[in-house]
Structure formats: structure tokens, C-alpha cells
């Protein structure tokens, strides 16, 4: 991943937008990453992963019970 200061990013947006097609661009302000620029394709992929995951609140009581009774490696 490439890193760029917020000031450089503002001055050369086109350059960094092109770079983001190949790899994520971390934008730094005061020495810490504050934003990321990614291609639309990568963003769509990340969103698809997000939709496939779910939190514990999405698990049924029956599945929770099966998980609690499961033994590792058996």
C-alpha cells in the first residue's frame, strides 16, 4: 500500500486516483492514516465480503448451542 500526505493528495488527486486502481492509497494527516482511496472494483469486493459476514446477534439459538457443544478437531 502506498501512503501520501493529505496535502500531496489534494494537489495531485488525478495521480493518486490512478494509483488507487492498482493498489489502495493511504492518506495521512499529521503522520497518521485518516482515509483510504480504493478503486470501485476493490470497494465492491469489500462490500460483498461485508454482506457475507454477520455478527453473533445473527446466529440462531440452535446454532449457538451446537457451537457450544462442538469439540475442536472432532
Image: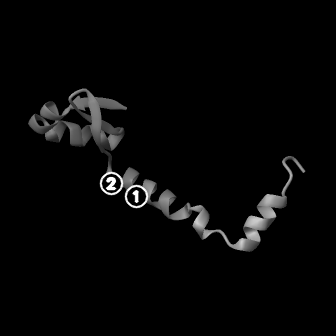
Q: Please, what secondary structure does the residue beneath circle 1 have?
A: helix
Label drawn at residue 40: 2
Residue 17 x, y percent position in the rendering: 22, 43
Q: Horizontally, is 12 left or right of 62 in the view? A: left
Question: Disc 2 versus disc 1: distance between alpha carbons?
Answer: 6 Å
Q: Residue at x 12, y 38 (%)?
A: 10
Residue 72 x, y percent position in the rendering: 84, 48
Q: Residue furthest top?
A: 31
Q: Residue at x 37, y 54 (%)?
A: 43
58 over 6 or under it: above or below: below
Q: Residue at x 77, y 60 (%)?
A: 67
Crowdedness near tag 1: few (<14), some (14–19) or many (≥20) residues, C-alpha within 10 Å: few
Label drawn at residue 24: none
Residue 30 x, y percent position in the rendering: 20, 29
According to the image, label 1 marks what residue? 44
Residue 45 x, y percent position in the rendering: 45, 55
Q: Residue furthest right?
A: 74
Q: Are marks 2 and 1 in contact (CB under 8 Å)?
A: yes
- Nearest to the observer: residue 15 or residue 6: 6
Quadrant where the N terminus is found in the figure: top left
Q: Residue at x 44, y 54 (%)?
A: 46
Q: Please, what secondary structure does the residue beneath circle 2 have?
A: helix
Q: Horizontally, is 12 left or right of 49 in the view? A: left
- Nearest to the observer: residue 1 or residue 21: 1
State how the image is colored: one colour
Amino acid at each position: 500500500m502506498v501512503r501520501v500526505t493529505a496535502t500531496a493528495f489534494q494537489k495531485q488527486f488525478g495521480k493518486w486516483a490512478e494509483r488507487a486502481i492498482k493498489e489502495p492509497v493511504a492518506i495521512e494527516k499529521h503522520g497518521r492514516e485518516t482515509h483510504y482511496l480504493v478503486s470501485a472494483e476493490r470497494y465492491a469486493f469489500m462490500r460483498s465480503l461485508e454482506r457475507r459476514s454477520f455478527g453473533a446477534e445473527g446466529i440462531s439459538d440452535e446454532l449457538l448451542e451446537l457451537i457450544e457443544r462442538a469439540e475442536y478437531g472432532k
